[in-house]
Image (spheres, coloured by chain):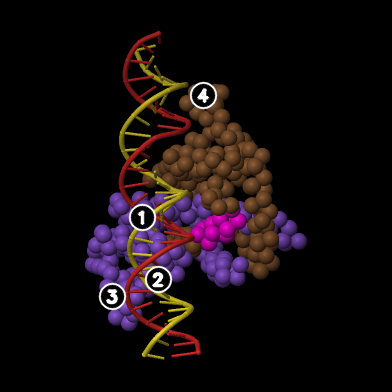
Chain colours: A brown, B purple, C red, D yellow
Amino acid sequence: MTQQGAPPLVFQVFNEIGIIEQLSRTVLEAHMPKGLIAPHFGVLNHLTRVGDGSTPIAMARAFQVPKTSMTHTVSGLVKHGLVEMRANPEDGRSKQVWLTDAGRALRARIIADMTPQFERLAREFDISKLRDILPILTELRVYLDEDRDRV
Amino acid sequence: MTQQGAPPLVFQVFNEIGIIEQLSRTVLEAHMPKGLIAPHFGVLNHLTRVGDGSTPIAMARAFQVPKTSMTHTVSGLVKHGLVEMRANPEDGRSKQVWLTDAGRALRARIIADMTPQFERLAREFDISKLRDILPILTELRVYLDEDRDRV
DNA sequence: CTTGATTGGTACGATATTGAACTATAAATG
DNA sequence: CATTTATAGTTCAATATCGTACCAATCAAG
């Protein structure tokens, strides 16, 4: 009985998520310098959290985008002096992406700039609800991620 | 005390939502004919649910995309014979977008094609959790939507 | 080793997204 | 009602996304 009407429910959840993604991306990009967009921040953030020296192909997999898209995104960051490309000493085909000081600083500044807005959200929106949905969103993300390979 | 660390929580929620959006969009587009992508489906679905004869500018607002993006999306649907553009008898500047039979049929077919996958999700994932998060996602979407104009 | 298959990355072309500028029509103002 | 302002839509240019094709380096099989 619980599965009665399940597809519309799934559909609605994905629909809301799509809208929230669009709105939150707009918020992020409002805090980014001209010429840089969400994927650029994603890479800066990834390199900061996971650590420098990752390869383009590894990041393409992490973000689940084609490697050509990652080439494009990283080249934009290089052009802005936010990361450096170096040869991978362990594999002649491969390259490593390293944050520059400017890259680290920009990521930190963007996060700092967004913090007041997030704090305001935390005051005006019942943040405990976000705490409630986070594990479920994670579970859904993991399911979809694993499912991706099966279909 | 509940606001301690709120920004990271908000950040994590948006991050998971971004990934889920990407994965679910990939699922949708896997069921669409070559040359059509998620925004095309969005318009077909919108016209079916809200009703025919909407204007491009109204749909641009509904989807919160620039009107140039909507022009492009609608023109792709016209090119594929899925919608028709007509003059708006009530406003000489404006146009109306009408579904063709092919447009209605395609939307129905895409949904039908995705239903088994959604039903499988409903079997393998605890669907009651989606029921739990849907109202919170809606609330968050409404908050962000209203907040958008204020900032 | 040599050769064939695989992998990391780029070049290129087709389509998508979006801001700026423009046209045509409608609405508002005096 | 003439003129200004606002609105709906398109065109154009810049950048983004991503599939295909390609190259160079590595790995695997013999």
- Quarter occupied by residue C5: top left
Number of the front mark, 4 or 3:
3
Residue type at numbered disc 2: Ile
The residue that label 2 is drawn on is B57
Q: How many angstroms separate mark 1 from mark 4 (CA)?
A: 37 Å
Q: Can residue B14 be seen in this view?
A: no
At a point 52% along the width and 53% down the height, the residue shown is B18
At a point 55% along the width and 52% down the height, the residue shown is A34
Q: How many angstroms separate mark 2 from mark 1 (CA)?
A: 20 Å
N-terminal label among 1 and 3? 1
The residue that label 4 is drawn on is A91
Circles 1 and 4 in contact, beta carbons < 8 Å: no
- Chain letter belonging to callout 1: B
The residue that label 1 is drawn on is B37
Q: How crowded is mark 1: few (under 14 residues within 10 Å), some or many (20 or more)?
A: some
At a point 56% along the width and 67% down the height, the residue shown is B148
Rendered location of residue A132, percent (x, y): 62, 60
**With B79 as the anchor, is A110 left or right in this view?**
right
Instruction: Mark 2 vs mark 4: tell me if same chain.
Output: no
N-terminal label among 3 and 2? 2
Q: Is the magenta stretch mostly helix, strand or loop?
A: helix
Residue type at numbered disc 3: Ala
Q: Is mark 1 on a helix, strand or loop?
A: loop
**With B76 as the anchor, is C9 left or right in this view?**
right
Above or below, B64 against A105 in this view is below
